[in-house]
Image (spheres, rainbow, N blue to C red):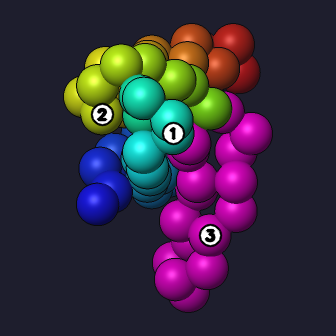
Amino acid sequence: MAKQLELKGHKYWILSEPDGLGWKASVAEVRDDGSQESVGIEASAHTRGAADDAAERKLRRLLQAY
């Protein structure tokens, strides 16, 4: 399952998957043609929601830097 965000005119997916006893989330940018590219952001936590939230915070911080 993916969470979709639209920030600064770009679409992003936060993808999460089980990782050992917790969850790991990663961020990909989705282009208009449907292709996607990893942004290089990952986050881990005990729950899926916490991992997704941590990845989203990292993405928002990265975008504020530009």
Asked whether 20 falls inside the magenta stretch, the response is no
Tell me which numbered mark, 1 or 2, is placed earlier along the sequence: 1
Q: Nearer the viewer, mark 2 or mark 3?
A: 2
- Magenta: main secondary structure: strand
User: Residue 28 — which label?
Assistant: none
User: Residue 19 — which label?
Assistant: 1
| For residue 49, side relative to residue 62 (left or right) | left
Identify the element where label 1 is drawn.
strand
Tell me which numbered mark, 1 or 3, is placed earlier along the sequence: 1
| For residue 57, side relative to residue 43 (left or right) | left
Q: For the residues marked 2 and 3, what is the alpha-carbon distance in whole angstroms? A: 21 Å
Task: Categorize mark 3 by other alpha carbons within 10 Å: few (<14), some (14-19), many (20+).
Answer: some
Q: Nearer the viewer, residue 10 or 12?
A: 12
User: Residue 36 — which label?
Assistant: 3
Identify the element where label 2 is drawn.
helix
> Could you say where residue 8 lies in the image, as x and y percent from the top left?
47, 38
Q: Nearer the viewer, mark 1 or mark 3?
A: 1
Task: Tally the numbered discs.
Answer: 3
Residue stretch rendered in magenta on the structure: 25-41
In this view, 24 is above or below 29: above
- Tell me the kind of residue under disc 1: Asp
* Disc 2: which residue: 48
